[in-house]
Amino acid sequence: MSSPLLEQLIEALRVLPGVGRKSAQRMAYHLLERERTGGQRLADALAAAVDRIGHCARCRDFSEDEICPTCASASRDVQQLCVVESPADRLAIEDATGYRGLYYVLQGRLSPLDGIGPAELGLDRLAARLAEGEVAEVIIATNPTVEGEATAHYIGQLARQHGIRPSRLAHGVPLGGELEYVDRGTLSHAFGTRSEMG
Amino acid sequence: MSSPLLEQLIEALRVLPGVGRKSAQRMAYHLLERERTGGQRLADALAAAVDRIGHCARCRDFSEDEICPTCASASRDVQQLCVVESPADRLAIEDATGYRGLYYVLQGRLSPLDGIGPAELGLDRLAARLAEGEVAEVIIATNPTVEGEATAHYIGQLARQHGIRPSRLAHGVPLGGELEYVDRGTLSHAFGTRSEMG
């Protein structure tokens, strides 16, 4: 390699998900050949983000403030609380739906084998929040995986203990999907939970 | 978006080749959730690279020194000069072959419509280098595209003007390739330039 700094940059780029040696090389050359301004901007944005983005004290989503803008907003419905596994899931729901309630971001899912229990997911703080009495519905939007379902079950119990109604996203055949290509588990579930046509 | 800094990071990541909005989001979340140390290291490496990597005064490859280590090395053969379009091409040749000569990196190819002429590729400095009399063979390793071939032709003429023998990488069927899947142009060329078996 003709430059140790270039070698360091290529190694450092491999921290990005899905970026191997070859892509890292291509990215480094691209930045140096054609995008030095953009590269400088990326370096600044990354340093600022790593340094100043923490977690909202209320919902555990990423936030550079003590309380994130969503939790601080006066126009959100405090009676609804949507529980998601990750900030990316929260963003997906916010983008796709017209949901105007609040969120709670677990930053993970129950996984005893990996040492992730209720404490690591901040479920004690979620319980304290439910005890405040403002929340009327807990919408559980964990992923439909084994661990996500276990987490949903746990949170559902927690909600009922506080006299709050838990709800769960509907499962079934995706819109625009073809039955032939839907996995067996989903198809079987969708068949079993079929509803009468209106 | 819950954090302006996060939004800035996602936008800044899109400067990377092949990274759209969705991948940039995934990268930003990955860095913040699991790789803050790596993210900081990437920010530092990127800032240092953009700031301190320039071009070697001798071969125009990326270098943080006035003269890059390859050009400064006493163990390289100064009689051979390999001309490539980009630093990535130079690296590919250095990695794959046992070549021990020097390089000249054009940082582009002749493309009059884009305003890239001989001056932009430093061909005046290449001519001055050839006039020094040290180089005995110019190995032209531009890409086998229309513009690459035009560039090769131009450099070939330049070499001959200085009484130097130009050579060109062999074209043909790739090793391990199957004839059925080789493009027509390559196959036709390989057929036409077939050689007698030893």
Image (tube, coloured by chain):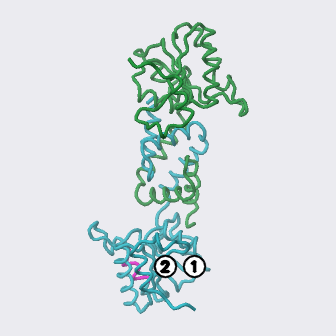
Chain colours: A cyan, B green
User: Is B151 or A149 nearer to us in this picture?
Assistant: B151
Helix or strand or loop: what does disc 2 sit on? strand
Residue B148 lies in the magenta-colored region: no
**Where residue A147 appears, x then y in whole percent?**
34, 73
**Where residue B16 appears, x then y in whole percent?**
55, 47
Residue denoted by label 1: A99
Task: Locate the C terminus of chain B and report the quarter of the image it occupies.
Answer: top left
Q: Which mark is residue A121?
A: none
Q: Main secondary structure of the magenta part?
A: helix
User: CA gap, disc 1 to disc 2?
Assistant: 9 Å
Quick check: B168 above or below A78?
above
**Where residue A155 appears, x then y in whole percent?**
38, 81
**Badge 1 or badge 2: first in the primary sequence:** 2
**Where residue A137 appears, x then y in whole percent?**
48, 87
Instruction: Please state the total of marks drawn on the protein image.
Output: 2
As drawn, which residue projects farthest toward the left?
A113
| Chain letter of the residue beneath label 1 in the structure image | A
Give me the residue at 49% from left, 89% from top: A195
Quick check: A154 above or below B7?
below
Give me the residue at 51% from left, 40% from top: A28
The local crowd at label 1, few if under 14, some if 14 to 19, many if 20 or more residues have their Cα within 10 Å, is some
Give me the residue at 28% from left, 71% from top: A112
Residue denoted by label 2: A82
State yes or no: discs 1 and 2 in contact (Cβ < 8 Å).
yes
Helix or strand or loop: what does disc 1 sit on? loop
Q: Amino acid at mark 2?
A: Cys
Task: Locate the N terminus of chain B and report the quarter of the image it occupies.
Answer: bottom right
Magenta region: which residues? A122-129
Q: Amino acid at mark 1?
A: Tyr
User: Is A72 or B77 nearer to us in this picture?
Assistant: B77
Query: On the same chain: label 1 and label 2?
Result: yes
